[in-house]
Image (tube, helix red, strand yellow):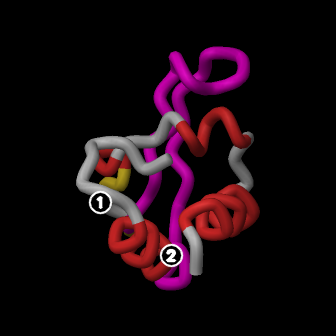
Amino acid sequence: MCRDALIIRLVYWLGTRASECINLRWADVIQLESGPAVHVRAENAKGKKERFIPIDAVVLELFDELKAAQPESEWMG
């Protein structure tokens, strides 16, 4: 699957805005006590509010596919 299609699927699965998704870094995928999550930084979020979005195995698999489909970078998008 191409990188752009993966990003569109991530926007859908995460419920993020496109601008939030393209500003995600690989370091924003974190492990909380409740399970894996994506950290949306305040400077990238609407209303400038930081939040954590729980993710499941489907999203983790999409992240793996995205990482394989793009050159090495700290940025996801």
* Element type at mark 1: strand
Give the residue at mark 2. Answer: 62
47 versus 58 height, above or below:
above
- Confirm whether the magenta stretch covers residue 53: yes
18 versus 11 height, above or below:
above
Judged left or right of residue 46, residue 40 is left
Q: Nearer the viewer, residue 71 or 33?
A: 71
Q: CA distance from mark 1 to mark 2?
A: 17 Å
Q: Residue at x 37, y 42 (%)?
A: 75
Q: Residue at x 73, y 41 (%)?
A: 17
* Element type at mark 2: helix
Give the residue at mark 1. Answer: 31
Judged left or right of residue 18, residue 76 is left
Question: What percent of the width, then of the height, locates residue 65?
Answer: 43, 77
The answer to which quarter of the image holds residue 70 is bottom left
Range of magenta residues: 36-59
How busy is the neighbourhood of tag 1: few (under 14 within 10 Å), some, or many (20 plus)?
Answer: few
